[in-house]
Image (tube, rainbow, N blue to C red):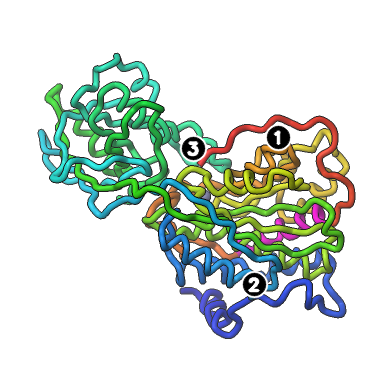
Amino acid sequence: MNKTLTALAALAVALPVAAPAAANVPPNPPTLAEAADQALQSDQIAYLFVEALTTEVGPRQAGTEAEARAREWAVARLKQSGFKNVAVEPFMMDTWVPGDIARARVTAPFAQDLVVVPLGNSAATPVGGIEAEVVFFRTVDDLRAAPEGSLKGKIAYISHAMSRTQDGSQYGFAGPARWVGAGIAASKGAVATVIKSVGTDNHRNPHTGGTSFPEGVAAIPAGALSLPDAANLERMFARADGKPITMKLEMNPRQIGQTESGNVVGEIVGRDPSLPPVLLACHIDSWWNAPGAFDDGAGCGIIASAALNVSRSGQPLRTIRVLMAGAEEVGLFGSTAYSAAHPDERIAVGLESDFGADRIWRFDSNFRETNPALHKKIAAAVARFGVSSGNDVATGGADLNIVRDQKGALVDLQQDGTRYFDLHHTPDDTLDKIDIVQLRQNVAVWTQVVGILANEPAPILTGAPVPSAPPIM
Ligand SMILES: [Zn+2]
């Protein structure tokens, strides 16, 4: 622990919660810009949020008692911090749990164990495991091209080539190996699938994440090998000389039926609550294998801190609502439930933080052409934090279904994703990975942007709505 963190930990004991919000605006409140600048220098709300969440709750898989504890924790935290109208909006979901056995072993010709984890929605193997020949596919498209029935009785191994990118775009390129690989293999007769983890690290930490099976295709066991283990398996193929490579796979995940999840909401109430609110989203769940510091404890800390910082500079015109969604990782169930539960409620603009804690480098909106004055005002206000104005149309994060369903206004504050996929969905997604200097830059940018949006009297999305892309997990 370095000195800054030691000092913060001491403060965490002395000051377990943030200063109360709007109720306690000091006599000489900072301007919005000053509040943002102060956040850049010294914000501690976001760090202490994720520090406490990862310490006091830890991993919080959707639909389990751990996620329920995370909701209770978030409710208490938001109330103590000065949020109003704090509530849980429960919903029911089909819940999958990973089990406690995940073993992969190459049995021939180079017998050795490989490190594997199940993918969300994976079926279990028979007790004692399943042993079969492995068929190597370099890409999902190669798998798609395999003849019908050609994988009968086989284990499909699916690779990909993913590199680090600032914008994380290679996730969209490599992700299908995980998202659809198992379903395609099952439809061609495979008895199981293992993929090369969708990630960019070089540790023996497999990356989990959800997979899916098409309608009418029964789930099969589906696992992810760590990147070095996948590389090892590929070296075996390179020197097996055509001899079959066989693997024994044993996993015991299961579907446990319907359980309760829920969304946590809270508000900084605006001066005119009749105006549509500004919606700030993150997700409170994580996979079972990580405390979810980057994904997405940091995002929840950033949005909570930004809302509180804006209120320090005076009560905003519009209500700022935070949505800490449940069950994002396993299928965006919280996002869907929130939209369904609020069919007639207009949202002024939606923003989400769910890409780690590294610095924001670009601002995109979906109103750059239809409301250029507001877009330019925000761009000018965040330039001093090193944030450029992008030409992309903002599509909103996974938990903003309600805004996409309304074809409403969206802002994307693009974070540096260079190291995000080293950690994503792995046991390595822990508090020590958070760089507090970069986290504070996030809070500063969010404070500035949310403050402008929450004090904007006119409708934010004017003119023709821009079509938005579907979210990815
Ligand atoms: Zn996430």
Rendered view: 27 above or below 331: below
Q: Position of residue 373 (x, y in %)?
A: 88, 42
Upstream in the sequence, badge 3 or badge 2?
2
Rendering quarter of residue 466: top right
- Tag 3 residue: 171
Give the extent of the magenta segment.
437-454
Q: Position of residue 109 (x, y in %)?
A: 10, 33
Return the x and y of residue 140 as percentages of the image width and height: 38, 26
Q: In front: 9, or 3?
A: 9
Q: Which residue is mark 2?
A: 79
Q: Which residue is mark 1?
A: 393
Structural distance between the alpha carbons of marks 3 and 1: 19 Å
Amino acid tagged 1: Val
Q: Amino acid at mark 3?
A: Tyr
Task: Name the amino acid type tagged 2.
Answer: Lys
For label 3, the SS is helix
Main secondary structure along the magenta-highlighted residues = helix
Q: Residue furthest top?
A: 147
